[in-house]
Image (cartoon, coloured by chain):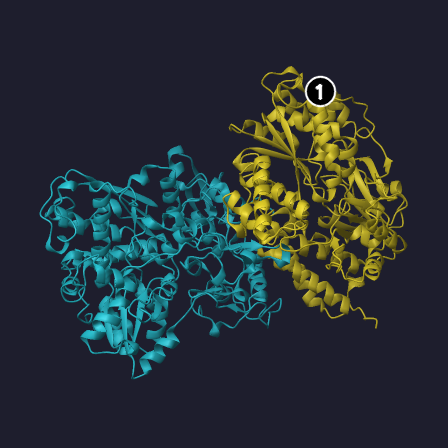
Chain colours: A yellow, B cyan
Amino acid sequence: MQVIEREKLLNRIDDLKQAHGTTRSALMPILQNLQDEYGLISGLMMQEVAHALNIHPVEVEGVASFYSFLHPNIKKGKYVIRLCQTISCDLMGKSRVARQFENELGIQFGETTKDGLFTLEYTNCLGMCDQGPAVMVNDRLFARVTPEKVPQIIANCRRNFLKSDFPQIVPSDVQKSGPLLSNKLKHGDALKKALGMSRSDVIAIIREAGLKGRGGAGFPTAVKWQLAGAAVSDMKFVVCNADEGEPGTFKDRYLLHEQTDLMLAGMTIAAYAIGAEKGFIYLRGEYQYIREHLNQAIEKRKNSKLLGQSILGKKDFNFDIELRMGAGAYVCGEETALIESLEGQRGEPRNRPPFPVDTGFEGHPTIVNNVETFVDASLICAMGAKWFMQHGTEKSTGTKLFSVSGDCERPGIFELPFGISVKELLKEVGGQDAKAVQIGGASGRCVPRSEFERAIAFEDVSSGGSIIVFGQDRDMLKVAKNFMEFFVEESCGQCTPCREGNVKLLEGLELLEKGECSSSYLNELIKLGHTIQIASKCGLGQSSPTAFLSIVEHFKNELLGRVQTA
Amino acid sequence: MTNKYNVCDNSRGAKSTAAACVITPDDTTALGALIKATIDDQSVNVPMGTTILEAAKMLGIRIPTLCYHEDLCISGVCRICVVEVEGMRNLQASCAYPITQPITVRTHSRKVRQARRHILDLMLSTHYGECYTCVRNNNCELQSLAKEYGVDFYRFGHVDKPKTGKDKSSYAIVRDEDKCILCRRCVRTCVDLQEVGVYEAVNRGADTRIGTFMNNPMSDVICINCGQCINRCPTGALQAQDPSDEIWDAIDDPAKHVIIQTAPAPRSAIGECFGLEPGNPLTFEMNTALRHCGFDKVFDTNFTADLTIIEEGTELILRLYKALVEKDQSIALPQFTSCSPGWVKYIEHFYPEYLPNVSSAKSPQQMFGALIKTHYAKMNNLDPADIVTVALMPCTAKKFECNRPEMNDSGYKDVDYGLTTRELAQMIKEAGIDLLNMPKSDFDDPFGTMTGSGVIFGATGGVMESAIRTVYELVTGEVIEGVFEKARILPVRGFEGVKMAELTISKVGPVPDILKHLVPDWNWLKGATLKVAVAHGTANAQKVMEDIKAGGPLSECHFIEFMACPGGCLGGGGMPIPTNESIRAARAQAIYAEDEASEVRKSYMNEAVLRVYKEFLTDGPCGHKSHKLLHTEYMVRGKKLI
């Protein structure tokens, strides 16, 4: 029997090799397939996949154990219930939901029921921050879960979702639309316009529009494209970073649904500009329910000659897009970690320089842009630079999509011009009473009331679009702790300052919670925070203590000298 | 899986990216681009792509490092080497930062010192153990840095209980994860340098650790015991399995006759454990020290190195004769050497289908053990049960080898203990012996003849060189010096990953007595070109094996020497720490100097060897007796654990 099972597995791995290839880059898709089919990644699977790809079994285990959604050696339940533990859902009462799940199932988080039906797990940001607490059961999403709804979810599972009241896709509310969201472009419009220009004119118009990366870092898109375009190589790659993992961000999830065509057009335009023939969409594992939709959109564009060979009749322009799934690792939003992940490695950021525009996917020039950046690039090509620059500031042109969650009246998606002050933004979202606003997610800065006049723009407070509003009653120590717990888990674990340092910051917050932290030790931790900022290897590490530092700076009085309640 | 020794490519992504793209100075001088680097107010013009660390070295400025190792790909993870680059907000890892434009750097600014101190404090907070109970006390990179940066308290606390404890399951390698600082040198050593793949980082974030496959103990993973990870570990997280307590027990037991055989590499390097620069051999001082320690006899493994050449050389001649003259298709060629137990285990795991190619001759260590407990015991009226054989080796894999169950042809365990250079140095210190000032003394007879051909076994290419010297002279009847000046067979020397050489036999002589029972004449070799190759480090061995599998030029060789360790035995896992290419080169130079100083430099001229064939192995090389005692069999292990 065992021999037959083994044979079957080996045959299956052979099939998967046929489907995904034998380079290391095939590792993640193969593991994901096997896990979907067998419910776990066994030692035998890791060994055999390793040999199929000509790597060492322990390397496969290194990869499998890196990603939260891959589970080597552990058989999970038929239904894996993942409760979002990140800040926005935390604010909306995730703890009570968690308790109720435990009560209903009789197990703790991290455990599986004896009948093998249910596994309870925490997960980081599901991108449902405006509708928290959010729960994901396998690939189904549940929004605004209350303790009361928990038994119903479990019952639905037991009934195999037959009478599910829950739709698979839960769209976010667009609270305020702007030129991007209300565009009237039709299938193919943007690309037709772009292909009417020369490659260098495409880059020139992006430069003229002053488009900067929408992921948060704000690197000028045209410079990235220019560098990759100028690099000499027989192969180049365009990657869409759809690994939207920043706590409090969900606008890419919306764009992936609603502006799919413009995003794909943007990738194609980028490919045209730099001379790439292959593109990847790296879609975060938490968004696997968008997969089918994206594949259909790609197919549709292929049928319309907007993708594939000789696009729109241009003989020398071929471009294909492949969808790759992430597997639950926030750090893969960092572009070099994302490329590592695409290559079938642990998602560990690389040393920079060299930069991806020079040495990217499998050593070839590669550009990695955010979903929104590609949408904007399409709009700029279709509507012109001037049209785009009507909004925003001189250094931060255009509008920006904001994902708003937390203590406000109108959580959801807002398209607002760059340069808007925090105060104005709070007025838009109905959060005027806020005590503080977290701008830019866990890696961003906590802006207190005294700084609400500051502008959200690359030149002032930069943001990838995550806005989390904290009301007057919020305990900022709990907020800081949530962020630090996030980074302790999501650090790739490579470099010392980020891996070990964030643990120390979290332990410091625990001391504060118990009222046992001296101000001199707190000062030592502040200094450590600065070290983590300047000595870590990648952007994640460098920004990981930002929330801690800004909260300690502005709310020190609230943190020190706590008396523990019994 | 394509990394070559000392060559990094992009196959390991993050770990090697910088190295892949940092153009090394040699490559770029051609471009002629020199860039001014100003470091701590001193300037130097460096080729494009030079790292800040390299530029600082040129200026004699020391930047501390931990994850960086000259033998390995750039990693940039420990962050201890961070420096301040003018115009940049963040500190940069100097090991990984390529200079591509004029740059101004400060290596010890306030920011830098504070960051380094923090990083050290963080490492120490999770590094379990007290220095004085650690094998690496006084030779630990973390300890040195803590001293250098004036660490006088644990700023961020300190673990007071071990998390995992030591894994002592392997005969060769002890892991103490509690001391691991996650620099990943072992990962890069095992995966990139050696292509064995025992270790990899597993899990993520604060849970990250260095794992073995399925968290198996070291005894149950595919490990070749080469110990290269030990040599590169900056702390005591990786150690060798130390038998010195048992050896002291044997020495102190009057009923035991304790003999030690000493391999050529340890004598070339033991001085490093006593503060000498690499390249200063202490052969004869060490002999005296060993006697002071209480060993009853001190023998030279060169004796069985020469014996190996005779047995292995004869085996080669027989294989060639059967293949070329008798047209026996079943004969496996090229013949592979078998002296490196790391290599033997490597091929048993990764290329078991080629085991017929491996010479059946035991390694010199095991031949010696077998002879001691038979021939020597009889000569001296000793009960082999009372003999304890210790092998001083540069090698951790020898510890595994002597414990292989089949290695008991004498009726006893042929070799009782494998002792490394480092462990002997420790024993000498414990005995209060001033090694550097010991009077010199020779090896004991009857196995004490020191030959140059045995000595060079310690360097990559040495076995091949000895084999060529002997085979050439036995076949042609002429001296090798006629072809290679001073018998220096340069094509097989040096640290190039894979070396190939050819030697044409233009004339043949009479068959010497010792081989007359095996071949009638040498005419079948007349005009033949002998093709040989040498590989060191198992990543290079992998290259050779893949070439042979693909029917490439290496498949046409007749004889190939493989050594598991980079540089050969002188780079062994039991040799003094640290190691790098210049240290290994200095040891090699010492070994070749000792060869040239030897009176006898050809194995077949070793009197002790000839005497053994006359008195004990009377049916000659590869005869029945020698087969029983000096030859062995291998095991198909494969690479499947599950």
Q: In the figure, residue A337 lies in which quadrant?
A: top right
Q: Residues within 10 Å of mark 1 (few under 14, many from 20)?
A: some
Q: Circle 1 is placed at which residue position?
A: A304
Against A268, residue A335 (above or below) is: below
Q: Secondary structure at mark 1?
A: loop
Task: Left or right? Give the position of B577 relative to A482.
Answer: left
Decide: is B66 above or below A320: below
Residue B505 in sight from this viewpoint: no
Q: Quadrant of residue B444?
A: bottom left
Q: Amino acid at mark 1?
A: Ser
Where A512 falls versus A445 (above or below)?
below
- Tell me the subunit letter for badge 1: A
Q: Nearer the viewer, residue B58 or B418?
A: B418
Closer to the camera, A557 or B77? Answer: B77
In the picture as drawn, the residue positioned furthest to the bottom comes out as B254
Report if residue A498 is visible in the image: yes
